[in-house]
Amino acid sequence: MKALKIQSDMAKRAAQILLQLLYYGCLILFLWNNTMGEATGFGYLLDHAARRIFWIVFFGISALKLILYLTSGERPKRESLLLIFFGAWILLIRTQWNGFLDETFLYCPVIAMGAVGEDEGKLLKAWFWVKLLIILECYAGSMIGIIPYLVSGNGGLGADHAFGFAHKNTLGMELFSVLILGWCAFPKKGNLLTMYVGILGAMFCHRYVKSDTGTLMLAATAAAALMLEIAEHLPAKWTWKVSVGKWLGYVLAWGYFLCTLISVLLVRGYGTEEKNANTEGFFHKLNDHLHRRLEFPWKGLQTYGIHFLGQRVEMNTGEGAYFFLDNSYYYLLLHFGVGIWLAIGIVSVWMMVRIGPVQMAEAK
């Protein structure tokens, strides 16, 4: 009997390892395919029919992995089950009540199911390496002519370069996401490396890419890393340094909601000036500097309004009246709705609160 139990445990462990490898393989393929299709000039690696088959396979692997984990006697984290609930809820309301579904959201509950019991650090490392390799691949592809180099004028300020990405701002935000992922996934590399890379990335974005958004976010990340590094090396008797790191952590953790609030206030200010026909006001000048990023959210708000379940927001970058919601927070609120905006915010805060202290503890 003892030998049979040992064999059973070994078989179950082998199945867990196999499903874990298959899960990470599917996760990497999803991240790679999704980023390549939506952000770069390469396009999707898998066509629409292949993506449907892949989703079924990914769902089956994640479901088996979750069942095996739950039957092994391990107690799942409450947060993991919360993620599955949110993922399934998002999938339900988008398909049944709205009649349309963005393909990416099909993977929310699938990824959450497979992530139960997994180490957050491994998931972050997989995400980091996929993003970094895609950036290098697009840069190399644009250099040798496999994909369009994508150079455009920049209002007399020289040319901006997308280096194989769909847009210069897309590249800027991809660089920012890689920096953040690297900072969280490899905490032992320290704040100084994050600061140096952030400064170099901001200089590259400003000089060649000319993405104001990417430059600002990279520079802000470098500044945050510098503040944390200074706080860590202050004398121990200066107890207020703990408060600096603590409050900075709160700002970063709740940054999603804070940025939404700032965006709403800016657009509201623009709308107030628009109603008063004050085209020379502060917010109109700011809108010009931000390339109409206050004007279009205001127009979208007037046209569609904000609903709990969202609605299909039609954008036009071709012939006719130009309309493009180049504001992530308003795009979420108008297109996906308050429900999904809130769910993403909860997951975002949970990740920062849960992963941040764990990764910082590992760095010490």
Image (cartoon, rainbow, N blue to C red):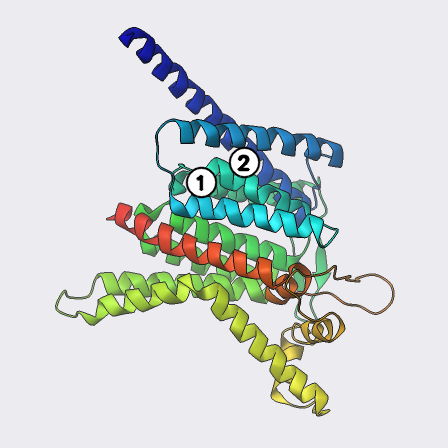
Q: Are marks 1 and 2 in contact (CB under 8 Å)?
A: yes
Can residue 133 be seen by looking at this rendering?
A: no
Residue reaching furthest right?
320
Q: How many marks?
A: 2
From the viewer's perspective, is 152 left or right of 5? right
The location of residue 45, given as percent across then percent down, is: 68, 35
The residue that disc 1 covers is 123
Categorize mark 1 by other alpha carbons within 10 Å: few (<14), some (14-19), many (20+): some
Residue at image position (51%, 31%) is: 23
Residue 280 is drawn in which quadrant? bottom right
Front one among 226 and 59: 59
The residue that disc 2 covers is 27
From the viewer's perspective, is 222 left or right of 171? left
Front one among 218 and 153: 218
Residue reaching furthest left?
237
Say if 270 sits above or below 237 in the image: below
Mark 2 element type: helix
Q: Amino acid at mark 1?
A: Leu
The location of residue 138, given as percent across then percent down, is: 62, 44
From the viewer's perspective, is 132 left or right of 185? right
Residue 206 is drawn in which quadrant? bottom right
Q: Earlier in the sequence, mark 1 or mark 2?
A: 2
